[in-house]
Image: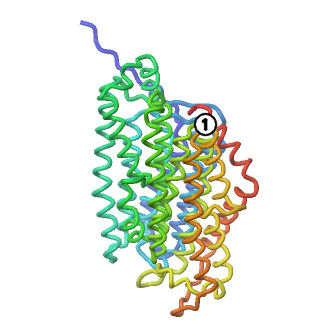
Amino acid sequence: MDMLEFVVPELDFRAILPQIILAITALTVLLTGVFSREKKGPAIGFLSLAGVALSFSAVVFSGSQTVSSFSGMLTNDSFARFISMIVCVVALLTILISINYRKISPAINSGEYYCLLLFAALGMMFMGSAGNLLMVFVALETMSISIYALAGFQKQREKSIESALKYFLLGAFASGFLLYGFALVYGATGTMDIVKIGRFLNDHPLVVHSPLLLGGVALMTVGFGFKVAMFPFHMWTPDVYEGAPTSVTAFMATGVKAAAFAALIRVFYVALGSLQVDMTQIMWVIALLTMTVGNVVAIAQSNIKRMLAYSSIAHAGYLLVGFVAGGELAISGMLFYLLGYAFMNLGAFGVIALLAKKDGEYTELSDFAGLGFKYPAMGLVMAVFMFSMAGIPPTAGFMGKFYIFTAAINSGFIWLAIFGVINSVISIYYYLRVIVTMYFKEPEQDIVMLTPTGAIILALVIAAAGVLFMGILPSSVLDIARNSTTLIM
């Protein structure tokens, strides 16, 4: 009887060098937090910052070739590298904000906090480079479990615990839907490899419309829809954003969205490209409802974190317009938008974090009255971020919407582009309301901003510079994004 031969899978650690650096940094930070005598200094934050910077360097200098490893489970291609760069930018700015936020919430200044943040970033990177549905799920859970804990990190605040519980319960259901969807797709195609699924469906067109595959795709859409805050799976967003620490909310609103859209693009365009025609009409309606519900409900919000939560839902709708349009310009426009959104959203939450206080946060819109004159620099950068979110030139938000709506028109989705423009006009009202409050309203109470550290000043400068650079010189970033889509389309 012949013995079964065990074949060792091909391992190329170049494919995961940035992730290895993040994992080592996370464990080092955790141990440093446990054994360090200095419990109140920002050293742990700066150590985390160094690890993210080193990981970012590994991404930038990893070359242009595609490296596949672990039997195709992970792929370090141009698309994965662009997503990894976005994740590194998000993690870097979040850590800079957190170093200042520790003044308000001492719990933030712990090895556990930065360890969870780095492991969440690790999961986000793996989602961008996953070449197998099983790897997508493992990466998603690595990210999600860390975020669940971070959302409830302020254990002394009931809202923080509430946000973590809501996110965990709903996230667990969404993960179940996603995993069941993967199982049905595996049953229909016989493989979980993303590239092999695409080839199988191209070679077996009758399977494309089988109930097994369609059921799997429907369940996967629910799972991914929860993570990107897509209608009607968006209801968790405002409560979780409001209750979580502001630094975590900023991280969640940008990094999770980038990672989820990365997985969505790779799975639906590479593995399920044969279903694109069938998916288009459904996603057309979902994109319209997502951006409309997000913008309309945001108008009624008096809490700025809840307003930005519904704004996040609306931005997911704009990104779905690009998903519906398809094509090189649409996908590269989505990547451009995700990076620009990271800068403007992290910057806006960074300003909110500046105004936090020992026993809570100033998150009501009325709290911002008169701050534009009391703190001119803070008011100026906040205005830049609000203009960018509203899509007013010359900012990253304007150029991102321009590329996505142009792609929609080129693909024949003219009415969807028109609805997108209308929604952008609607959003101007509540974004400009923040600026009007800062500059034209008399303060109802005396708000005193804590002395900002150099870290958060650097974060706001980087965010504002990124927003303006991408708005004034967009082609340099778009060219990189366009090169990143060659293997997807």
Q: Quadrant of residue 386?
A: bottom right
The amino acid pointed to by label 1 is: Thr
* Residue 244 seen in the current view: yes
Left or right of 134 on screen, residue 413: right
Left or right of 192 on screen, residue 251: right
Left or right of 439 on screen, residue 48: left
Q: Residues within 10 Å of mark 1 (few under 14, many from 20)?
A: many
Q: Quadrant of residue 281?
A: top left
- Residue 181 x %, y %: 32, 37
Left or right of 166 on screen, residue 47: right
- Residue 2 x %, y %: 27, 8
* Quadrant position of the C terminus in the picture: top right
- Residue 348 x %, y %: 57, 69
Label 1 secondary element: loop
Name the colour scheme: rainbow
Position of residue 359 relative to residue 454, above or below, is below
Q: Residue furthest top?
A: 1
* Quadrant position of the N terminus in the picture: top left
Residue under numbered circle 1: 485
Position of residue 228 relative to residue 430, above or below, is above
The number of discs equals: 1
Residue at left 65%, top 48%? 403
Residue at left 67%, top 66%? 464
Is 256 or 271 nearer to us in this picture? 271
